Each structure stands twice: as structure tokens, then as C-alpha cells.
Amino acid sequence: MVAFDEMTGGEGGLRAAYGELDRWLKEAPPEMLALRRSQAELFFRRIGITFAVYGDEESTERLIPFDIIPRVLTKPEWTKLEAGLRQRVTALNMFLADVYGPKECLKAGIIPPDLVYRNACYQMQMVDFQVPHGIYCHIAGIDIVRVDADTFYVLEDNARTPSGVSYMMENREVMLRLFPELFATHRVAPVDNYPDQLLATLRSVAPRTASSDPTICLLTPGQYNSAFYEHSFLADKLGVELVEGSDLLVKDDVVYMRTTQGPKRVDVIYRRIDDDFIDPLVFRSDSVLGVPGIIGAYKAGNVTLANAVGTGVSDDKAVYSYMPEIVKFFTGEEPILKNVPTYRCREREANAYVLDNLEKLVVKEVNGSGGYGMLVGPHASKQQIETFRKKLKAQPEGFIAQPTLALSTCPTFVASGVAPRHVDLRPYVLSGANGISCVPGGLTRVALKEGSLVVNSSQGGGTKDTWVLDA
Amino acid sequence: MLSRTADSLYWVSRYVERAEYLARILDATTRLTNLPSAYGGAGTEWQSAVATAGCEETFAKAYGEANERNVCDFLSFNPDNPTSIRNCFALARSNARAVRTALTSEMWDALNGAWLELQRFERKRMDREEFARFLDWVKNVSLTFDGSAYRTMLRDDGYWFSRLGVNVERADNTARILDVKYHVLLPETEQVGGSLDYFQWTTMLREVSALTAYHWVYRQAVKPVLIADLLILNRRMPRSLASCYENISRFLDQIGDAYNRHGPAQRQARKTLTNLANTPIEAVLQRGLHEFIEDFITENNRLGHVIVEQYL
């Protein structure tokens, strides 16, 4: 399986977008690249991105590795991607409004009802509740993979509390400092207006009870959360208070923050706490991270939660497989972005195919995440395959299967020099009352091990700056 | 601002200030015990250091004898002593991290750097020379942090709460030294006097880094009544009770002005300040130094509670 290389496009070629970068890489001595890489590391350490991963007791600090060679997308590529993202997120929001409202898509048979009703993320609390301005998923992080010059697949819709956007911004910041000469020869679309767009989005969805200058805060689980750095980074850039559950209180269905000048009313909460933990009165009663009564205030229409409660029902693996139909049903358009072809084992024919081709496919548990309960056929032993065969026969509706994808590669500076490594892309899409916005690019994650397709930072993945060329 | 943010800023400063104070106590005590026995005290210097640090009970539980090794270890590194230097830095950093955005990057650098560097000092293997270097380093961390706050913070409530922490802690520390050692300042002991007390006195001055200041202010030999004056009433001396209260009162007034509301905290601070300003040292001694200090400590604690109630 030969992967598409975004610089060469294949053997010996050179794609136009990478022309300048290729020339620069050829001229740049390896010592210079190594030096810049260590400078970049120093920069990340200094601003404190490291402390996201080390606890107070142990000082073992770990950086998410940063690769100094940018990933380049052309404007036409981005334009198409962006249109696809807008369409996808529009459909996600319409789907959520529908499953918690009139349920037209279930009546029309677009998706089997049990996938919605029996979904652990489907929140009964949200049924027939009008969320402010009708928007559920204000911040989405759509994972995209590329397989050839023209084909981008959506790998996953992250509609709950997607993270990583601080890396997108800090990566650009460090590139601007270390390689000003590259920015002189490339016209790169900026990403540093993301916080402004996010703030505008959050302001636009304030409840109608709020003043014209709504009070916004960012709710974090606290400093022991692995994404705490990002939470404080965003709060700082947004110029809003970073609050923990204990900083908020609810009185008569209104949310207040405890300030040095007494309680101050809060209108919009960008929450980075999962549904399960947000209100011990409604969800997990043992949660000490959340705010008792916040759901009551939410349902009384006195506060907006971004994202809304219950968005998880739209980014589950089984629902994912129906996204092309969902997009078509709600937007009336053909999906611009494709799904990775997915076999739903609940369908008899599909399951027969999967059972015959287990050694070629990736099989995933519908409710699994984080790589658990997964079979990677090409890398699995005979025994593992047989175990899955039994599971699939016993409970086919619990699984989906996908072909093993050849993710595209990008030139990456590794120990042996500059070499191709597999990448994915997570653009961040914002939905507010004033429409959808999306800064050009997103977070590129790269699998630093040769041949590896796993881009997760927990398994040796790194990140790259992502450039959308403006010409 | 969020109450939790103000609270953390207040405590970050208190913990850093306390770490420096502990380093000063250890430094001064080491000097005192280094003297030939003819000049030294009753051999209770280390016990007195623990008392000055205000943790006699926890110490007694953890160690038997109050000797140099035990006390230095206890006050510097012991993880079970909630206010060891190590724990002061740990708590300061943890508070700082929780309110990262309220700190300037310079302040964060100072604390984060200190925490990382602290791991390099090995608790068990420290000889006197290395320990002296450690104490110097602690004082430097405090100076760097304090300087960063002074030079980089916006002058708004965040700054004022952070400065309040420094000054409440300072007042508490100076009062504690006086509380433990008041007896060497009593007029009677002056007559008994002699070289023994002289070095006790200079140790006190060293603990609040005021030995040189003393000479500049009074231009005469070290006398207990003047030490008491310097540590309690002299507003030129940054660690005196009067100077601390001048600052506390000013920062509370600035907060009150900004919030358009003055409350019990402002009144309590003003009351203590007035009391310090209107009592000459002779009157303090007449009334009884120990009683005066005990009253002060009670009032200072009350202020701490009132600040918490009013703002945090």
C-alpha cells in the first residue's frame, strides 16, 4: 500500500505548493534544522506547554513533539475542505436539533432509531428543549485524513469538547519566530484570529436574558486535567475568566461566579467538562468537578452551554457511518467530504464481507474509543482474528469495519534526516448565531515512527504547523 | 476578579515570603550556633528556630532532638511539614498554576523554575556549604518572584491582593520572632547582659535582614529597646510591623476604592495601623512587650479572617 506524499505526489515528483519549501529544505544544512528544532523545544518549555503532562509530584516533563517542517495546503484544496466542513457541521447541528426535537430523520428511516435512543450519549434531559439560538455544536474538531491528491475523508466528528487548538496557535507562533524567511516566500493565511472568532461565536449565542455585553467564562475540570494548559491559554486569549466548578453557584436558576466583588451573573459557559460531570444533581452525583443546578439554569434559558449537552450522540462510530445520508437528508446536497467507507456489521451482507476479509480490515467497537476494543487486521495474529470473528458473529451490531487507509505523508525532520511520515488534520469549526467560521488550516498531527499510522500524542505522535497558501 | 484567583494570588505571595523567612531563620541560627560556646546561648538555638517557625508540635512528632541536622531537614525539605521550604514552593507553584493567567509570565517563570530546580537539591546529601548555597538560592527565588511581581504586574486588584499576601505574612513572621524571643529584649536582661545577649540580638536582626539597617537608623551599639523599636514601630524598616501595616492598609484602601466599597477589612487594618503609630516604644515596653505582641498577633489573625470573609 503506497501512501500519497503531499510533497512529491509520488515517485520523484514535486507538487507546486511545496516548491519553495523543497528548495529551502535542500539548501538548509541539517545542523540548522536541528538547532531550530531545539530552539522550538525551548520555546514550548518556556511558555509552559509542557506542564500539561507532568504532575506536581513527578517532574518528568514531556513535550508533545513539534516538527519544524510545515504541512502545506493550497488555497483550492482548503476552499473545498472548508466548504465540506461547513456542510458537515451544518448537518451535525441540524441532526442534533432533530433527534432532540421532531425526529424527522428517524421517521424517514435515515438512521435506525435504536442507534439514537439506546446511545449512552443521548440525553433525555435535552428532549424537546430549545437550546439558545438552535445551536448545539458550537466548537467542532473534525478529523480529516487524506488518501490522494483529491480525496479527503472525515475520520471522526468530534462534537463534544475537542482539544488541540492551542497547539495550532502556538505552532504558528513558534514558526513565525524561527523561520521568518519562510514566511517571506510564502503567503500563509493567519490563524491568530481564532480567539476573536471564538469569542464572537460565544457572544452570539448568549441567552436572550443577557445584556448586550454578555459575561462569558471557560469552565475547566482544573489543573490536573491533561488539557489544563489549553484551557488557561484560551481563557487568557479570550480575556474571560477561567473558572472551576467551585467558582460557580446557581441561585434561582441563574449561574453566578464568585468574585471579590460578590456574585457576578454568567451568561455563556464554554465548558471543557464532559456531560457526565457537569451537574451532580442531574448526571453523576459523585462528580466534584461540576456545578450543582447548572442544568436547571440551562433549561430555564438563563445560561448557554457551549457545546450543548448531549452532542455526543452525533459523533459516535455507528452514527458516523450514517453521516453521508444525514448530510444529504438535512442539507439536500451531496456530501462534499466523504466518509471512510464503513461496513456496518449490523447489516447482514456487510457482516458477511467483513467476516471474509478480517485480515484486511480495521474492526472497531461501536462504543469503544481510544483504540480499545479494536482489531487492526493486517497487524493482528490469527488468534486475535478468530476472537473477533466470534464476537462479530455473536453481536454484529456492536461493530463497524473499515479498510486500512493509506494516510498521506508529509516530509518530516526525524533522526535520520528529512523523511515522509503519515499525517492527519483537525480543523476547528465554529458555529454561532452569525454563521459558521473556520480558520484556514487546523492542527496537523504526525506519526513520527516510520510506517506508523497512529498520530495520537500518547503513542509517539507529534504536531506540525499547517499552512494554507493564499495564492 | 474571581475570588479563587484573588485567594491564590494572596497565598502564592504568602508562601514565597514564608520560604524566604524560613531560610533567614536557618541562616541566622547556623551563624549563632557556630560561635564558640563562650559566646553562645544555652544550646537551645535550634529549638528556638523551630518555635520561631511556628511548628513545634509537628516537629516534636517527627523528630526527637532539636539539633542542626533535624531542624534544617525539617524546615527545609520534610514533605510532612506543611510549611517546609519545599512545601512552600510546591504550594506556591500549585496555586500559581491554578490561576496561571493572573500571573505574568515572569512570575510564573520564577516559580516554575524554582520548583524544577528544587528537585536538584538532594535532601540527604547536603553538607554545610551546600546547605548555605541552598539557603541563598531560596532567598534569591523570593527576590526574583517579588521583583517580577513588582516590575511586571498590572496595578489592579490582582497586584493588590498579591501584595497583601506578602505584607500579612511578613507582619506575622516578624511578630513571631518577637513572640519567641521577646525575653532577650526585656530591660532586665539588658543588665544581666553581656556578650551572650548581644549575639541573640544580632541574630534577631539578621532574621529580618535588618542588621545593617539598624546601624544606619540608630547609629549606635545594638540595644534591645531600639531593636524593639526597629522591628515594631519603625516605618522605614520594611519588615517592621508598622511598615507592613502601612502597606496592608494602603493596598486594602486601593481595593476598596476600586470596588467603591470600604468594609471591615479596611477598618481593621486602619485600627491596627493607628495603634502602631500612636504608641511610643516606651509605652509598649511599659505595657509589657509580650502582651503587646500577643495582642498584635491576635489582631493580625483577625484581619486575615476578615479579608477572607470580605473578598475570598
Image (cartoon, helix red, strand yellow):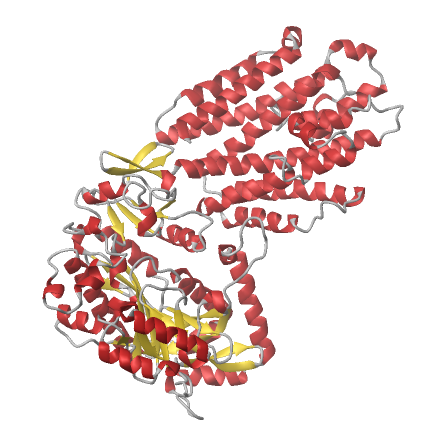
Residue drawn at 42 percent across, 54 percent down: A233
Total numbered badges shown on the rendered structure = 0
Q: Position of residue A259 (x, y in %)?
A: 36, 35
Asked whether, in this view, residue A16 is left or right of residue A111, the answer is right
Please say if B69 is above or below A88. Answer: above
Q: Position of residue B279 (x, y in %)?
A: 59, 11
Asked whether, in this view, residue B12 is left or right of residue A368, the answer is right
Q: Position of residue A253 (x, y in %)?
A: 22, 37
Residue drawn at 64 percent across, 38 percent down: B85
- Quarter holding the C terminus of chain A? bottom left
Please say if A255 is above or below A117. Answer: above
In the rendered image, the residue lying farthest to the bottom is A12
Asked whether residue A64 appears in the rendered view, the answer is yes
Residue drawn at 74 percent across, 10 percent down: B187
Asked whether residue B210 appears in the rendered view, the answer is no
Asked whether, in this view, residue B215 is left or right of residue B278, the answer is right
**Residue closer to the observer: A374 or A183:** A374
- Quarter holding the N terminus of chain A? bottom left
Asked whether, in this view, residue B195 is left or right of residue A238, the answer is right
Q: Position of residue A95 (x, y in %)?
A: 18, 63
Quadrant in which residue B282 is drawn: top right
**Residue closer to the observer: A130 or B192:** A130
Quadrant in which residue A262 is drawn: top left
Please say if A53 is above or below B79. Answer: below
